Amino acid sequence: MNDLDLNTLLGAEDDEGSPRRRSRNSGKRGGGRRRRRRRNRGGFIAPLLAFVVLAGIVGGGGYYGYLWLSDALVPDDYTGEGTGEVIIEIKQGQSASEVAQELERQGVVASARAFTNAISNANRSASLQPGEYKLRKQMSAASAAAALVPDNRLLATVTLEEGLRLSQTLTKLAEKTGKPIKEFQAAAKDTEDLDLPSYARGKLEGYAFPATYEYQPKTTPKELLAAMVKRFNQTAEKVDLEGGAKELGFKPQEIIVIASIVQAEAGRTEDMAKIARVIYNRLKLPMKLQMDSTTMYALNKFRTKATFAETETRHPYNTYYVDGLPPGAITNPGDHAIEAALNPAKGDWLYFVATDPKSNVTEFATTEAEFRQLEAKLRANGG
């Protein structure tokens, strides 16, 4: 068989897969197959070379690769509860990762990643509460996460009783927080940022609501006073102060003035609504209020009964001297006094006397003659 017949029978193809045309060299046996074998060897060398190079990398740098993977999967972490003391502040709106970075920066945890892993494992990433916390240096991430709970915040409390004047309130806040009284006095005068209601006319007296408040070491006097005004606003909304005042034919500010007098005069909560009625009855006559509490406020004194000379004092807060209500509140009333001012008891009383100083019992009278009898009873009880 000649070369032509052999190539034809073998179905020889060119590089593009088409049957090769015969050339002068095509008569040499095996020429086409040798080219294919060379090409196949070249295609095998590339993946073989890649494998050899990869093996070299793994073999030569495997230890360092392991360290890298280990650090990524198991971040640095301390063990135990740590030592020393460090104060950490979580600010409003901070994410868990931001807190983690601060903990690492202050040396509380070994790595931010360890903390985020710990807080995530505890399902508390979204429950970190703003505040200051006392932690330690070099704590395990799990210990740090366990310590950042609301109960561990550095909080103190101050309780402000009903009926305190603003001056007394500021003094107590200064004593309790350890901050200078001047800072509280300045904050009380600059009321623009306290969110006072418009009817307060920029005056804080009457609107520093009595309650128990929590505060942190970094809480400023203005922040504390703002919290008290916020609490007042909540009460005003709850009792519908503006709507109730309108029904009674008074302004909201006047209701707070009445409530402050009720708070100062009442010895017991159950007497407040009757005292409120006495005030409304006197205002309606008209009749001077003649409340000793307002006279004491005018003179910056704290007794319960004014002398005759004191009742002669010319002062806008002395209701023995002026007609109607004083221009502002004389105390910071609580819930019960405000509710009493909005819901006075039904009755025609014009007088009341705390006839028993020991039990704070208050009795009420309609006529001046009855009033004199109650005064005699008070004297008999040592009042």
Image: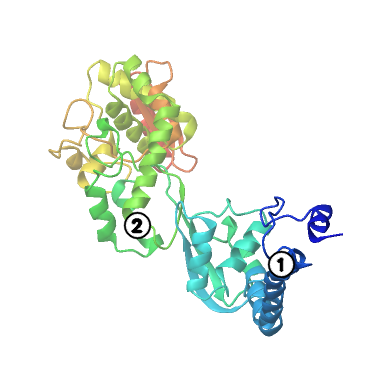
Q: Which residue is mark 2?
A: 220
Disc with the residue nearer the chain's start (2 vs 1): 1
Which numbered marker is on residue 35?
Answer: 1
Viewer-proximal residue among 299 and 148? 148
Q: Decide: few, some or many residues near mark 2? Use Cα within 10 Å; few <14, some 14-19, many ≥20.
A: some
Viewer-proximal residue among 245 and 285? 245
355 up-or-down from 216: above or below: above
Residue at the spot 33% in from the left edge and 55% down from the top edge: 221
Q: CA distance from mark 2 to mark 1?
A: 89 Å
Judging from the image, what secondary structure is the residue with disc 1 in? Answer: helix
Judging from the image, what secondary structure is the residue with disc 2 in? Answer: loop
Q: Position of residue 295 (x, y in %)?
A: 23, 39
145 up-or-down from 19: above or below: below
Q: Is residue 122 left or right of residue 216?
A: right
What is the quadrant of residue 367 in the picture?
top left
Residue at the spot 54% in from the left edge and 58% down from the top edge: 96
**Figure disc tally:** 2
94 up-or-down from 380: above or below: below
Name the residue at the right extreme. 1
Give the residue type at disc 1: Arg
Give the residue type at disc 2: Thr
Q: Position of residue 275 (x, y in %)?
A: 38, 27
- Which quadrant, please, contains the C terminus? top left
Can I make out residue 383 in this image? yes
Q: Is residue 55 left or right of residue 229?
A: right
